[in-house]
Image: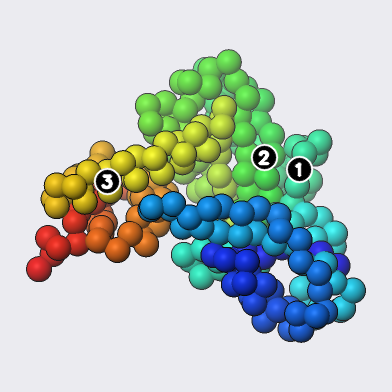
């Protein structure tokens, strides 16, 4: 059986694996999958793969789950989730997935920007789709606002299909990944400036996902804090030196 776990250090990941699986450390072999070194502002992390012949109740192995079984040590408390690889299998596997594909395909066609819609990834209570279109730049829109709007509509549609618990993520031209990398760089750069001038900086209006990324990126910087300001969906994040709050 193979399982994947993450921790801030190798020891933490191994301890987490032993506790969650209910095994002694002598009962499994450890393979280091990925190591992210800690920087001035960036947290370090280690991903390990556990190999064991011991039976584990209540957990599916990577093979049984059809993908990776990962223990996430992130800010939301972790928990096992099952990521099913879709490489070579981007087509719908059930009626719900087909309805979602048909909805997005019909929507962008009516907008006048047709494209091909396929499955990008499957996770527990999360479904990712991508749009391949020669009109991708228009479908994405400025700072992803068009893509966000389409994603909101498809999530409403998915809820009406009885799947309110499934979050649908929509992407095109890897915009989400590129945007995430850009926001992480922005967060660290702004944190540097705030620490230097002992002041605060108000960022541009962002959707909830982007704001959460800024908050979590800077969460472990001791002398920097963040807070959201404004009303509605697109609020702004203020990054400020902790000493300003008195």
Location of mark 1 (residue):
86
Mark toward the start of the polypeptide (1 vs 2):
1
Which circle marks residue 192 in the picture? Answer: 3
Q: Nearer the viewer, residue 109 or 189?
A: 189
Identify the secondary structure beneath mark 2.
strand
**Nearest-to-viewer mark from 3 and 2:** 3
Q: Sequence order check: which comes first, mark 3 or mark 1?
A: 1
> Looking at the image, how many numbered discs can be counted on the residues?
3
Confirm or deny contact between disc 3 and disc 1 (CB under 8 A): no
Spot occupied by residue 217 in the image (x, y as percentages of width and height): 40, 53
Q: Which residue, given by chain and number where applicable, does mark 2 sit on?
A: 120
- Residue found farthest to the left: 246
Colour approach in the figure: rainbow
Taking the spot 80% from the left edge, 80% from the top edge, the residue there is 26
Determine the image quadrant of residue 201.
Answer: top left
Position of the N terminus, as image quadrant, is bottom right
**Residues at discs 1 and 2 in contact (Cβ within 8 Å):** yes
Marker disc for residue 201:
none
CA gap between label 3 and label 1 equals 39 Å
In the rendered view, does 218 fall on the left or right side of 4?
left
Q: Is residue 197 visible?
A: yes
Q: Can you say which quadrant of the picture contains the C terminus?
A: bottom left
SS at mark 1 in the image: loop
Question: Badge 3, how many Cα within 10 Å: few under 14, some, many 20+?
Answer: some
**CA gap, disc 3 and disc 2:** 35 Å
Determine whether 101 is above or below 85 in the image. above
The x, y position of residue 59, in whole percent, is 76, 73
- Residue at horizontal 27%, vertical 46%? 192
Residue 185 located left or right of residue 230: right
Marks 3, 1: nearer the viewer:
3
Q: Position of residue 4 (x, y in %)?
A: 71, 63
């Amino acid at each position: 059986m193979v399982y994947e776990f993450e921790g801030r250090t190798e020891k933490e990941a191994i301890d987490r694996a032993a506790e969650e699986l209910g095994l002694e450390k002598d009962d499994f072999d450890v393979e280091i999958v990925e190591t992210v070194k800690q920087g001035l502002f960036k947290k370090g992390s280690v991903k390990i793969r556990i190999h064991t012949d011991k039976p584990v109740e209540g957990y599916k192995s990577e093979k049984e789950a059809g993908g990776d079984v990962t223990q996430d040590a992130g800010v939301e408390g972790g928990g096992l989730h099952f990521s099913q690889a879709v490489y070579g299998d981007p087509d719908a596997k059930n009626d719900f997935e087909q309805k979602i594909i048909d909805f997005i395909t019909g929507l962008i066609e009516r907008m006048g920007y047709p494209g091909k819609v396929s499955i990008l990834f499957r996770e527990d209570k999360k479904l990712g789709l991508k749009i391949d279109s020669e009109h991708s730049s228009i479908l994405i829109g400025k700072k992803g606002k068009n893509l966000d709007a389409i994603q909101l509509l498809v999530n409403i549609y998915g809820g009406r299909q009885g799947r309110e618990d499934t979050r649908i993520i929509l992407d095109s031209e890897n915009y989400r990944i590129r945007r995430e990398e850009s926001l992480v760089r922005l967060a660290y750069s702004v944190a540097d400036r705030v620490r230097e001038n002992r002041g605060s900086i108000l960022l541009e209006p962002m959707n909830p996902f982007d704001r959460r990324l800024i908050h979590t990126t800077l969460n472990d910087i001791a002398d920097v804090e963040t807070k959201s300001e404004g009303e509605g969906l697109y609020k702004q994040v203020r990054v400020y030196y902790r000493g300003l709050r008195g």
